[in-house]
Image (cartoon, helix red, strand yellow):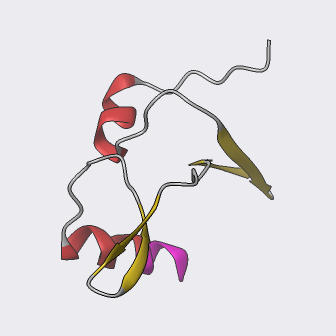
Amino acid sequence: AGRIVIPRSVRDAIGLVPGEVDVVVDGASVRISPVAGAGLEQVDGRLVITGSGASVTDDDVAALRDADHR
């Protein structure tokens, strides 16, 4: 049916909400990312993509950066 079930705890942790996603296959891994909408805002002179409202700490960003460099 073209559906992927992601546990609620995971969806809540990353702020994933119903909607269109991009699916990227990388070897034996699959990356699922929400499709960025046209919701660009200008904040302090920078264009930003409106997020899901999930909080992201400096530690979260560091963990994501480090995971990508393994």
Q: Position of residue 7 (x, y in %)?
A: 43, 24
The boundaries of the magenta stretch are 65-69
Looking at the picture, does residue 19 appear above or below residue 65?
above
Percent x, y of residue 30 = 69, 48
Question: Could you say where residue 61 lies in the image, as x and y percent from the top left?
Answer: 32, 73
- Residue 11 x/y as whole percent: 39, 34
Q: Nearer the viewer, residue 17 or 40?
A: 40
- Toward the bottom, the furthest residue is 45
Q: Name the residue rendered at 36%, 24% in the picture.
A: 8
Number of marks in the rendered image: 0
Name the residue at 64% across, 35% down. Answer: 20
Q: Is residue 25 left or right of residue 56?
A: right
Q: Quadrant of the C terminus?
A: bottom right
Quadrant location of the N terminus in the rendered image: top right
36 left or right of 14 in image: right
In the displayed structure image, the side of residue 60 where residue 33 appears, left or right: right
Name the magenta segment's main secondary structure: helix
Instruction: Give whichever of 65, 27 is nearer the camera.
Output: 65
9 versus 50 height, above or below: above
Residue at the far top: name it.
1
- Does residue 70 show up? no
Decide if residue 32 is on the left or right side of residue 41. Answer: right
Snapshot quadrant of residue 64 = bottom left
- Seen at 42% across and 71% down, the residue is 48
Q: Quadrant of residue 16?
A: top left
Please give the name of the residue rendered at 53% of the width and 75% of the height, measured from the top-left corner.
68
Res 58 visible:
yes
